[in-house]
Image (tube, rainbow, N blue to C red):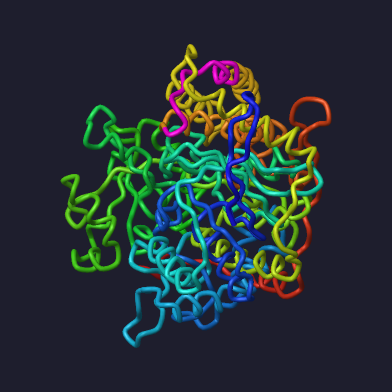
Amino acid sequence: MSQPSTATTDAVPAYTEVDVSVLVIGAGAAGARAAIELAEQGIDDTLVLGKRSHGDAHTTWARGGINGALGTHDPEDSWAIHAADTLNEGHFLNDPIKVETVAKQMPDRLQELDDWGMEYSRTENGEIDQRYFGAQSFRRTAFAGDHTGESLLHTLVDRAQELEIPYREDVMITKLVSDGEAVYGAVGFDMDSGEFVLFNAGSVVLAAGGYAAIYNRHTSRDDENNGDGPALAYDAGAELMDMEFVQFHPTGMAVDESDPEWEPWSGRLVTEAVRGEGGRLFNSEGERFMERYSPDQMELDARDVVARAIAEEVAEGRGTDTGGVYLDISHREADFIQERLPRMYERFQELGVDMAEEAVEVAPTSHYGMGGVAVDAHGETDVDGLFAIGETMAGVHGANRLGGNSLAETVAYGVVAGDRIADRIDGPGTVPDDLRETVIEPQFADLAALANTDGTYAVTAVFEELQELMWEHAGLLREEGQLDAGLDKLDTVRQKASDMNTGPLTSESFEFAVDVGFMLTAAEAVLRGAKQRAESRGAHYRTDHPAVDETWQHNIYYEQADVGGMTTHTEPVGVPSEAVQAALDEGHELDYHQLE
C-alpha cells in the first residue's frame, strides 16, 4: 500500500504515498461503522485514520444514550414517532428523508450492537433498558450507565479488529485532493514522526466530528471538534448547510476558574441522563425554576428551552457565584446514582462533591453543531466520491438536536454511506498530474513553511481569542450588531493567524495552528448564517427577531465564490412522509410528571 518517499525540489518536502480504495478520516463511531459495513460487504482495501490513539475519539464523551424505538418499556413507540420527535425538536428544518433513514434503522442497529457485545444497561428480565431523554415522547434512549459512547466505540473497535480493518493512528489530514468536481485523496502528516503523507483514494469518508469547540465553553477537548470535517469539505468544493445552528447543552460544569483543580472541567458535560433519571434544576433562591418555563416537560424540555431558561435565571441575578444554577439528584438513593450514573458520580466524588448528598453547579455550554457538510440521502457531497457522516454532516437535526440522536446518526449513516460506496468501489484513485502541481505539492510546502515560524502571536493566544469571540458574538443570544462586530473581529483574528509563532511539525502548537485555520472557516459560517437568519428557531435565538418566521423554513447553504469569500443561498425544506406526518398529527409528547 505504501510507496517510497517521493523525490522533490528544495521547495517541496519529501512525502510518502499510500494507495487505498476508501479512506475514512475519523476513527470515532461514524468512521468505524462505515469501515465495518465496507468490510462486511467484502471490501478489504479501506484505511481508517485517527488523530489520536485508536479507540480515543470524541464518541467516548457521549454519555447519556442512543435512540431507537425498541419499545422496551413503551411498546406504543415506533420509528415514525421517533422521526416525528426529531422533526419537532429540529423545528422542521431537518431533511425528512435523513430523519426517516435514521429512525427506521435504529432498532436493528441497537440489536446489532447487542449481538456484538455492547454492555447495555438491562431491565430485570434482561432486555436492553431505555430511559427518558429530553423532548422524547417515550423511553427510547438505550444506554450503558452514563458511559454509552465509550461502550459503543469499544464495541465497534472490537468488531473492526475482528474484521482486521486497517487503521492508522496519530495522522492529521490538512487538505483533500480535489478539483472541485471529484475527490482523489487527502494530504496530511504523521503527528509523531512529522512525515508528510499523500493518501490516494477512490472514495473519501469524512467522519471527523463537528465544530462545537470553536467556543471557549464547550464539552469537547480543545483538540477536537474544531471544524476539521466541514472546513476540509468546504475547501474541496462541497457546500455546507445549517452552520448557524449550534446546540448549547444546558448542563456543562460551572466552576470557579481560579481554582486549578476545577478549572480544567469548565464547560464539560454533565450528561442529560442526570435529568433523565430525575435530576432537578434550582436557582440560587431555591426555586425549581423550570416550573415557570415549562410546567409540563420541566427539566426534560428541549435543550434549547432549558439552556435559555438557565441563561435567563443567571442574567436576572438568580444564578450561583460561578454563573450557573444547581442540578440536584440527591433525592435519589446513592446506590441508584452509582448504578445509573457511575461516571458522573465518580467525577464529582474525585472533586470532593457527593452527588448523593448535594447539588452540582451547571451552566450552558457549546455541545454540538447541527450544521455541517451538505450531503444527499446516502451521505455523499456534490464532490464526486466525497462522503460526510456523523457530526460532520448536516441534515438530520435541523435547528436543534434531540438528545440521544447523535450516536444514532453515527451508526445509521455509517451503514448507509458504507453500503453506497461498496456498490461503486473501483479500486484506489489516480491523482491527476495537474493536482500534484496545484494542490498537493503547494500544501506540503505550506505545511513545511508553517513549522518553526517565528511569528508575532502565540498560537494558543489566537486560538483562545477566536473561541472568546464566538462566545461573545454568536453565543446563546444573538443580535445583528453583535454579529457584525464578530465578523469584523474575525478578520483581525485571521490576520493574526497568518503571523503565529509555531513549533515543529510534531508539536502541539503546530497542530493547533492547523486547527485555527479550520476554526476560521467554521466561525465565519456560523456568524454569517446567524446574521442572515433574521428569526429565532431552535438553538438560534435572535434578541432582535425573537419570533419564529414561517417564511424562514429554509436551509442556508454556504459555498466558496468563484472570486473571493463565502457566499450563501437558501433552499426550502422537504415534507415528511405520510407515516411520519400521521405521527406528527397524533401529537405525542413527554409528560415529565410520569417520572414522579
Give x and y (percent) for residue 224: 47, 43
Q: Residue 530 falls in which quadrant of the image?
A: top right
What is the magenta range? 493-506
Q: Residue 497 falls in which quadrant of the image?
A: top right
Q: Is residue 497 magenta?
A: yes
Residue 58 visible from this viewpoint: yes
365 with respect to 108 (left or right): left
Q: Residue at x 70, y 57 (%)?
A: 203
Give x and y (percent) for residue 154: 40, 65
What is the count of numbered marks? 0
Q: Is residue 116 magenta?
A: no
Vertical placement of residue 192 versus 575, above or below: above
Which quadrant holds the N terminus? bottom right
Vertical placement of residue 202 versus 304, above or below: below
Pick the residue in front: 166 or 265: 166
Residue 400 visible from this viewpoint: no
Which quadrant holds the C terminus? bottom left
Q: Residue at x 49, y 34 (%)?
A: 215
Q: Residue at x 55, y 41 (%)?
A: 211
Pick the residue in front: 588 or 248: 248
